[in-house]
Image (spheres, rainbow, N blue to C red):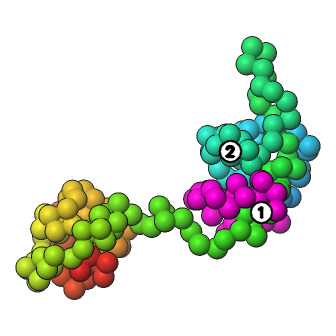
Amino acid sequence: MTTRANLLRNVRSVSAWRLRNKNAKEVVQRLAELGPKASVREVARALGWSKPTVMKFINLGLVDRCRRRNALAGRPLELDVNSVIWLVKACQRGPIQRPAGIRPFNRIRTKIEKRGTDGSFRELPTRPSVAEVAKFLDCGETTVLRMLGAQVIRAHRKNFCRWDIWKNNLPKWCR
């Protein structure tokens, strides 16, 4: 196994995981249209990534540069498109698991998993307010509102500022 494949296996990247879920034939076709050399911007556009993400994979050694960057000349950094195509195909063969950091509201979940349930779930009222849920989850009220918007916590909106939250509709990982 090549060292590049070992590097890719050890990288837990949300971008690589999303690249795995894309249609590889379309991405490879877009990359092949660029020619043998392409700029970071062109590769980022073809992959649907940002330029810093492409630079991260260059710095990790997963994507090759065609030549050294000449900052004085003002020319953009050129990449070897074949190495990017290799990266796309390697991501397709890679692990299916998504990285741990991609779970919604990962910090709150890991905090609760480390802390464990202390029985305070029973002390919550049947219909807690946003402030009471925030105090229970040890986070801010804005985070609870984001969780409501992402439907991590199921609730009914009474009006613009009021939510009807049922205690049993809180996620199972926080009980």
Q: Check if mark 2's residue and mark 1's residue have beta carbons within 8 Å.
A: no
Main secondary structure along the magenta-highlighted residues: helix
In the orientation shown, which residue stands out farthest toward the top?
A: 72
Q: Amino acid at mark 1?
A: Ala
The answer to which of marks 2 and 1 sits earlier in the sequence is: 2
Q: Please tell me which residue is depicted at 83% across the width and 49% down the height of the picture.
A: 83
Q: Position of residue 17 (x, y in %)?
A: 63, 64
Q: Is residue 82 above or below residue 90?
A: above
Q: Residue furthest bottom?
A: 168
Mark 1 Cα-neighbour bin, 10 Å: few <14, some 14–19, many ≥20: some
Q: Residue 42: image x %, image y %?
A: 76, 42
Q: Which residues are magenta?
A: 1-26
Q: Label 2 neighbourhood size at 10 Å, few (<14), some (14-19), many (20+)?
A: some
Mark 1 element type: helix
Q: Is residue 169 left or right of residue 124?
A: right
Label tally? 2
Residue 152 sits inside the magenta stretch? no
Disc 2: which residue: 60
Classify the position of the C terminus by image quarter. bottom left
Tell me residue 64's x, y (percent): 81, 42
Name the image quarter holding residue 174: bottom left
**Does residue 105 appear left or right of residue 43 in this picture?**
left
* Residue ID for mark 1: 90
